[in-house]
Amino acid sequence: MEYAESTTAHKVVRLYIAQLALELEGADAALRHDAIIDAEQHLNAAILAGTSADVAIAEYGTPVEIARAYMDADSTHRSWRAAPSTAEPRTLAIPTRRHLHEIPVIGAWFDRRAWGAIAYFGAVGFILSIGYFTWSVTIGSLVIGLAPIVIGIPLLVLLLGSARALCLFEGKVVQLFLGVRMPKRTQPIQGADHVGFWQRIWCWLRDVRSWLSLGYLLGNFPVSLVLFVIIAVLTASSVVLMSLPFMHFAGAPIAQVDLDSGVNIQAFGETMPDENGEVRLPLIVSIGLGVVGFLIFTGTLWIARGFGWMYGHVVQAIQVARPQAVNPPRIQ
């Protein structure tokens, strides 16, 4: 009788989760992930405590109510598909004021996501990727070296657990700088509750998300290195070019050459360097190069924003797991 009741409760919860997933169709993947995991954990905990599935669901809320609550609380992040669902009542579109970042071409200068991507790929993300890679390689080397003895297994569990934690932290950093919403919690290890030590280790080892997180920490370093080089070179080049007009008006030379070196160049109708060994550009040339620098940096902002969108959604896809099957409540 108890087994039949647990099986029935299991089916009811599965049906509820499926309905909630349907209500959140088209919503941001991370929001959908959090809502489904919260509902799954809450209902399972209530059933394990002795509450019937119907009562637990009635106390928690209908799928429509829960979906609307999550989407209302997180209205700033929407999926790129942004398909309407039954959780969102259809309303007439109301024209809104156009923001500066929506201006064609130069709008990237007013987009915090573009500047966040410059900061992330040009410094923060690259530094973190070095730390993640170093940690993973160091602990991974110990795991391989100690694999023949028992201590290698707990170290492997430590490596996988830390990989999941670091990926969760990285998600927060990505959300802050790149503006892509990340899940607030990771997918629980299926079957790891209420089991012995060795059974729990086995659950960790067979959980694909743990290995996926470790693969991200190892593979993220070369990707971050390439993006760092691209953003750093483009940013440095454009900043140098944009500074030329200001250097001209300030009377500062762009270079100082030793006259004894014998360097003598005819360019732009002038001799470089001058009698003082200073290299200066004509005003029109300085302004022209400054405009070129402005265009390059504008393009860099768009490139960084595009990289940020793709990179952020890759990280989100790694962290967001498809809902796993709900285990029937264990009868003590």
Image (spheres, helix red, strand yellow):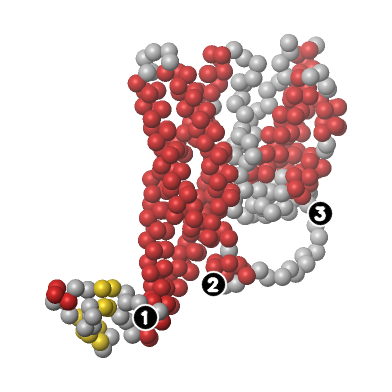
Q: Secondary structure at mark 3?
A: loop
Earlier sequence position, callout 3 versus callout 1: 3
* Residue nearest the viewer, comparing 275 with 315: 275
Residue under the image location 14 percent in, 75 percent down: 260
**Residue 54 in the image: x percent, y percent?**
84, 27
**Residue 226 in the image: x percent, y percent?**
38, 52
220 on left or right of 273: right
**Residue 193 in the image: x percent, y percent?**
64, 19
- Reply above or below: 277 against 20: below
Q: Which residue carries the number 1 mark?
A: 251
Residue under the image location 47 percent in, 33 percent down: 214
User: Mark 3, residues whose alpha carbon is within 10 Å: few (<14), some, or many (≥20)?
Assistant: few
Residue under the image location 75 percent in, 29 percent down: 42
Could you tell me how far apart the alpha carbons at marks 2 and 1 are, in whole angstroms? 29 Å
Label annotation for residue 89: 3
In this view of the protein, can residue 46 be seen by the observer?
yes
Could you tell me how far apart the alpha carbons at marks 3 and 2 are, in whole angstroms? 35 Å
The amino acid pointed to by label 3 is Pro
Quarter of the image for residue 284 reads: bottom left
Which quarter of the rendered picture does the C terminus lie within?
top right
Q: Secondary structure at mark 1?
A: loop
**Residue 101 in the image: x percent, y percent?**
60, 67
Residue under the image location 56 percent in, 58 percent down: 113
Label annotation for residue 106: 2
The amino acid pointed to by label 2 is Ile
Earlier sequence position, callout 2 versus callout 1: 2
Q: Secondary structure at mark 2?
A: helix
